[in-house]
Structure formats: C-alpha cells, structure tokens
Image: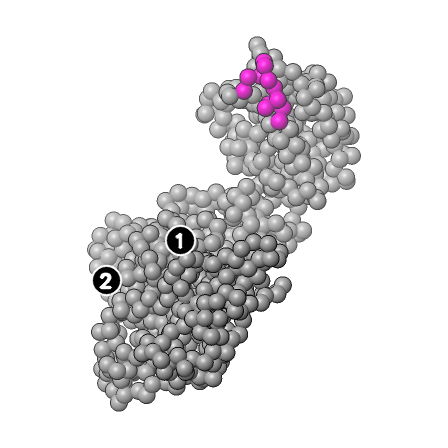
C-alpha cells in the first residue's frame, strides 16, 4: 500500500530530513538505507515522501502488526540527528485497507505523538449504518474536532458515538461537520445541509477556538465569547424551528489558552449548562483545570489526539439519546406551554407576555390610560420574576413609539430595574440583547463584557451598555476607533434624541472621529445621516496665554489630545504669532531653553514670554541633567505640533481661543499669520481678557469677551471652575459650536496628512 509520511521540520541550508524504520522499505533501521523526504518553497517546512510498503506480509507475521520508524535530520558537515532517543513513532496495520494513499501526519520533528494520526487521501464513500425500526436519525454539524481530525483514520468521538448508538438504539448518525467552522459559517451552512437530511436530532458541536479566542487581542476576547454564545442560541432556535431536537456539543480546551481564556471558557460552559438544552459535557474529561488539554490527550493546541477523542466519547451520557421514534413524535406533539406565556393582566387592557424560547417580552396596553413599570410595582415585579424567565441584562424594543423608552434593564434576580412609561394604545416587543449579538443579526465590532458596538448594516450602529456607569467613547480609545473602520465613512446620530449632546458619531477612513457618550444600562441606535463632507466641522484650538481654555474644554468634554499652547504660558501674543509662522521651529530646542530653579519653570531665550511648568517631573534633577526633560519635551511637542497642522489641514473651520490681555497690533499680526496657515478656510479668534473691547473693534472675525478665566482660581474652587465652564459653553453654543459639529484631532495623526 502507498503511505505518505509527512512532518514539519525546520532546517538550515544543506540539511535535509529522512525516515528510517522497521520494514525493508524503511531500511530496517539501517541509516544508510534511510529514505529521504522532500520539500519545496511552497510547502516548506512540510517535508513528505510516498513509500509503497508490503503491509500484508507484516499482517501475516504478527497478531498486532505495526510499523515503527523515526525521522532523521541529515547534514553534509554535521553528524546525523535522531529526532529523539525514544520512543519510536508507530502506527497499526489493519486489514481491508482501501487502495487510497494513507497519509501519516506526524506533526513536528522531535515531538513524537503518543498516538498516531493518519487519514486516507481519497476515502471510499461513507456508507451510513442502517437505521433501526424505532431508530432516530442524528446529524452532527460542527468543526474539525467533530469530524475526527487528528484521531487515527478520523475515528473521533462522533465515529465512536455513531457505532454505539447504532448498536444500542438503532440510531443512524450523519456527520456534516466542516474544518474551520465557526458559529457564523455554520449559521450560513445550516439551511443548506440540515433540512435535506431531515434528522430527528441535531448535535451542534463548535468551539471557542474557532472564534479566535486563543489568539485575538485581549480587548476582542469578550466579543469572541459573546459572538459564540449568541451564535449557538441562534443555531438552537434554527433547529427547533425545523421541529428537530437540538443537542449541544460541549466546550473543550486549547493548548494556547491562558488564565483569562480559561475563565471565559468556564463562564460560557456554565451558561450553556443552564440553557435547558442537553449538553455533551466534555470539559472536565479533557481539561487540565487551566483551560488546556490533559496530559496525553493533545495532538496539537486546537485538537485532541486519538486518546482525547476517546475520552470525549466516554464522557457522553448516552441516556440523552435513549428515545424511540414514537417517543420523539409524542414529544413534538406536546404543546409548548412556554411558547407564549401570560405573565400579568389587570383585565383593563394591560398585559405582559413572555416568549422564553425567543428570549423576548411583550407589553400590551390597549387601555386609554398610561402605565408605569417601576420597582415599586411589587405585584407586577413578583409575577415577572416568577414566570417571565428574563435574562439579566438589556432588553431592546423591536418596535417602539415616541415617548416610550426603547430599552429596559433586567436585574440578576429577573426583575425589571428601569422605569418604563407605557402610553395608551401600545403593543411593544422587547428582545434580549443576546439576540442582537447573534451573527445572523449583526457583526460585533467591539465588546469588552459591558460595552458592545454592533454593525447591524451599513446604515445602523447599535451601542449597548450593560454596565452601571456611562461610557465615554472617543478617538483616543484606539480599539474602539479602529473597530469603527468597519462602518462606511459618514455622520451617524441618534434619531430619537438628536439634540442630546454627544449623540453624534463621526466616522472617517481611520475610524471614530468624535466623542460619544452612552448612558448606563442602555441601548442607543445610531443611524447614518450624511457624508462627513456635508457638515462643516469646527476645530477649537487654544493659543494660551495659560491653560484656562484647556481646563474649560476638559470640563465640557470637548478636549482631545493636547496642542502646543495648551500647557504652556505665553504672556506675549506676538510670540505666539511668531511661533506659528515659524511652524514651531525652535519652540522646544534645548539650546534655547533654561531652567529657573526659583520659579520651577523652563524659560525660552528667543521668545521671552514663553515658559513651561509641566515638563519637569519628580524623578528629574534639572539642575544637574536636563537631558531627560529635553527628550520628553521633544516627544510631546513634536506630537502636539503635528496635531496642530493636521487640524489646520483637515478641519473645515477654526475657532482659536486666546486668554489674557494683549493689544490691537499683536492681534492684527496674529490674524494675518493665521490666515496664511488656514489656506482660505474660515476662522475666528476669540479673545478673553479683562480689557475694553474697543481695542479690537473692527478687526474682522475677532470676538472679544471681557471676562477672566483664571486657572489658579479654578483649580482652588471647583464651583468657580464649573461656573466658568457654563459661561464658555454658552459662548460656544451662541457661535453654533456643539458636539454635533466639533472636529476631533486624533492623538497620532497620520504622517501623510
């Protein structure tokens, strides 16, 4: 018979791989008669060789015939290297081989498997075992482990189950699994492969590993978990809708899992065991307690070996399948009392219904009066807790009307904690957020266990906050910013509350470009409104003289990453104009800086009105060594200046803010220099100083406010800081600037912009 031996082996130039073993074709352990393997550029580091072996002769000379062998690494200049002193690799010879090539996949050089893995390249068509008179047809839809990968001749747990169920109950099993299957791909395949087979039972056998849990970024792990659980729930529903009985294949470990992966694995396992669906409980049978395979059960990180498959099979409770055709028919005919369950009715037109299987909840108010669902309505809450089967978390309205909250939150005890006003003539259905996470409903862009950002289609983004605190989503949150690259560029807002601050989501080619606030325990649906080019985005750029503007923008939550003048003192407006004209050249030049110990500040020799108070840190010794300070300033101010120019190139309008007194000449000079840098884009200069506005009368686009925003007083008195913030907010609103048209500069602007 033709055997193909293959192994992954790293080699250097001049090295090669060979095999020697216990048969004449393998050299009878004589290294001079070893057989050389081959590789090429496309297949390296996989080496392989095809060898015809007279296995029938071996079968005649031994009761348990097997072939033993090892791989060698050969080199022209070095002695040959055996892959290990012991044990030998081996595989059994079985009767009735098919004429197809048998591939022996030996994994990696030097890592000798306890159990071999071999499969026929072109296996004969599988003949299903005949179904008994009262036997059932069972379909397995899963991934490579369900197919039996890495078990000898693909005789994995499903193969063992097939043999036992046929012998014990007369059942028939068909395996429809696919290598690499995820919940998303299985949902897509399900209607194509399951209905034609018309099984009685469907075993859904998927894994968190194929959702990318082991190797995705830490911030994506919760999303992988939620996508998996929601997908399983969707597959269960699809099975039940066809009148078939679902059974879940349990979770199993992965050799690359670490403590957090193991926690997520156990967390999902616990929930699956409480879904009311039979589960093939494999985890304890093959897990070492840390999320990885038990010793001796692993072929590679993602797959069990022959022994691991055997352990999985032996962990299956066969009583789950102890059912005849007549019993199954009777079960299907039994009415599902929990399909639509009346939870509460006051006989006045107010009713609450629960659909436990669908994880949904219906509120009907056909009366002329409004109702309020609240914590103090004890009778209603007790009925909901006792009968509704609500899942803790957010429930979202499928159909809503103005004046009605489109979501509510459910406590851990199954009661509703959100106050919900129900207007007359209302019929609302709320669905668990878990349904919205289903791959069939949406694409999970981001999920951290509390905050979920879902792409429902190219026009809708749903954000779900299941936590007790509000979420501040903004461009400096890199993972969220990047996740939203999946959405088409444009402006998205909350159509229900378009005037609420921070409910406008601006998305560009590089992801999120605005700040968005999501209230605790809520669900907000953002709808595409227009292209970014259809709104005029205004950038607010402080120009000193101190950090007052930065402090006020911070309290308004209009602040982004710092600009060059945000944290400096610039007492002379002429210096500011000169620095901008020179494109910040020399602003942080060490040759022009000196430290004043008495003042605790760094001063500038060229621009005498410029100084820095926030650059020397407690661990520095500026009197003896300023180099760490200079290095830090170079990094910080290079980035801040890049943001300044990026903003001038990419915003549509500008509002420059300057606090502190100045004179008319300096203002005119600054306006001329800003006009040159803004390249024809509209801009205004807001001056805030305790001096007469007559000084600046008639200067186009200059706004003066006779006010004082003293940062020292604001630091000392939070009440005064908030008062000043309210004043600034009113001024910006009067100028038409809000969170709906604010330009947000990214923390690390692309260098090609």
Marks 1 and 2: CB-CB under 8 Å?
no
User: Which residue sits furthest bottom?
Assistant: 133
In the rendered structure, the answer to whether residue 339 lies left or right of residue 206 reads left
How many numbered discs, if any? 2
- On the rendered structure, is 428 left or right of 280? right
Relative height, residue 23 to residue 443 (above, below): below
State the residue position of label 1.
257
Viewer-nearest residue: 437 or 336: 437
Residue 477 visible in the current orientation: yes
**Which quadrant would residue 165 be assigned to in this image?**
bottom left
Q: Which residue is mark 2?
A: 387
Q: Secondary structure at mark 1?
A: loop
Whether residue 268 is visible to the viewer of this picture, yes or no, is no
Say which residue appears at 52% left-offset and 43% top-offset: 477
**Highlighted magenta segment, given as a residue range:** 620-631
Q: Residue 35 location, x and y as percent?
A: 53, 69
Q: Residue at x 61, y 40 (%)?
A: 748
């Amino acid at each position: 018979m033709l055997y193909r031996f293959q192994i992954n082996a790293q080699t250097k130039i001049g090295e090669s791989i060979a095999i020697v073993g216990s048969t004449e074709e393998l050299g009878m352990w004589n290294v001079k008669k070893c057989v050389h393997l081959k590789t090429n550029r496309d297949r390296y580091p996989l080496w392989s060789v095809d060898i015809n072996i007279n296995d029938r002769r071996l079968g005649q000379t031994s009761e348990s015939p097997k072939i033993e062998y090892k791989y060698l690494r050969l080199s022209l200049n070095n002695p040959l290297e055996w892959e290990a002193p012991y044990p030998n690799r081996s595989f059994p010879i079985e009767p009735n081989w098919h004429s197809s090539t048998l591939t022996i996949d030996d994994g990696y050089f030097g890592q000798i498997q306890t159990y071999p893995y071999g499969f026929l390249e072109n296996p004969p068509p599988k003949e299903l075992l005949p179904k008994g008179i009262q036997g059932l047809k069972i379909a397995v839809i899963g991934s490579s482990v369900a197919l039996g990968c890495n078990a000898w001749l693909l005789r994995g747990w499903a193969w063992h189950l097939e043999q036992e169920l046929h012998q014990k109950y007369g059942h028939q099993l068909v395996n429809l699994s696919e290598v690499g299957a995820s919940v998303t791909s299985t949902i897509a395949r399900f209607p194509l492969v399951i209905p034609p087979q018309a099984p009685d039972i469907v075993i859904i056998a998927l894994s968190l590993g194929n959702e990318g849990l082991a190797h995705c970024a830490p911030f994506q792990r919760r999303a992988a978990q939620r996508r998996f659980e929601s997908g399983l729930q969707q597959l269960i529903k699809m099975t039940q809708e066809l009148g078939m009985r679902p059974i879940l294949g349990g979770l199993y470990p992965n050799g690359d899992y670490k403590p957090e992966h193991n926690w997520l694995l156990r967390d999902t396992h616990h929930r699956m065991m409480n879904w009311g669906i039979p589960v093939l409980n494999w985890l304890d049978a093959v897990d070492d307690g840390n999320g990885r395979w038990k010793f001796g059960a692993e072929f590679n990180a993602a797959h069990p070996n022959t022994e691991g498959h055997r352990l999985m099979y032996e962990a299956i409770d066969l009583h789950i399948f102890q059912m005849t055709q007549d019993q199954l028919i009777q079960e299907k005919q039994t009415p599902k009392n929990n399909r639509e369950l009346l939870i509460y009715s006051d006989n006045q037109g107010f009713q609450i219904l629960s659909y436990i299987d669908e994880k949904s909840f219906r509120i009907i108010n056909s009366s002329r009066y409004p109702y309020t669902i609240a914590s103090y309505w004890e009778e209603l809450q007790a009925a909901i807790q006792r009968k509704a089967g609500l899942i803790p978390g957010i429930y979202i309205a499928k159909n809503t009307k103005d004046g009605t909250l489109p979501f509510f939150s459910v406590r851990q005890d199954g009661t509703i904690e959100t106050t919900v006003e129900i207007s007359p003539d209302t019929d609302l259905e709320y669905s668990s957020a878990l349904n919205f996470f289903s791959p069939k409903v949406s694409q999970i862009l981001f999920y951290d266990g509390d905050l979920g950002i879902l792409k429902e289609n190219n026009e809708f983004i749903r954000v779900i906050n299941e936590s007790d605190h509000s979420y501040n989503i903004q461009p400096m949150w890199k993972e969220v910013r990047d996740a939203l690259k999946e959405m088409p560029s444009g402006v998205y807002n909350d159509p229900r509350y378009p005037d609420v601050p921070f409910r406008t989501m601006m998305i560009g080619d590089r992801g999120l470009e605005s700040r968005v606030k999501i209230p605790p325990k809520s669900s907000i649906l953002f709808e595409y409104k227009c292209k970014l080019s259809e709104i005029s985005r205004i950038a607010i750029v402080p120009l000193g003289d101190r950090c007052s503007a930065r402090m006020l923008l911070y309290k308004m939550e209009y602040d982004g990453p710092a600009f060059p003048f945000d944290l400096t003192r610039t007492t002379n407006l002429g210096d500011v104009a000169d620095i901008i004209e020179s494109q910040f050249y020399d602003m942080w030049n060490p040759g022009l800086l000196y430290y004043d110990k008495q003042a605790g500040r760094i001063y500038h020799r060229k621009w005498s009105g410029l100084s820095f108070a926030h650059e020397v840190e407690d661990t520095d010794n500026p009197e003896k060594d300023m180099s760490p300070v200079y290095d830090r300033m170079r990094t910080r101010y290079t980035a801040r200046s890049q943001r300044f120019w990026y903003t001038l190139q990419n915003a549509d309008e500008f509002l420059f803010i300057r606090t502190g007194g100045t004179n008319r000449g300096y203002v005119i000079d600054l306006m001329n220099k800003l006009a040159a840098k803004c390249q024809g884009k509209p801009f205004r200069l807001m001056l805030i100083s305790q001096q007469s506005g007559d000084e600046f009368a008639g200067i186009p686009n200059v706004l003066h406010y006779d006010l004082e925003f003293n940062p020292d007083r604001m630091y000392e008195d939070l009440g005064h800081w908030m008062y000043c913030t309210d004043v600034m907010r009113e001024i910006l609103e009067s100028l038409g600037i809000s969170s709906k048209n604010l330009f947000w500069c990214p923390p690390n602007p692309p260098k090609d912009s």
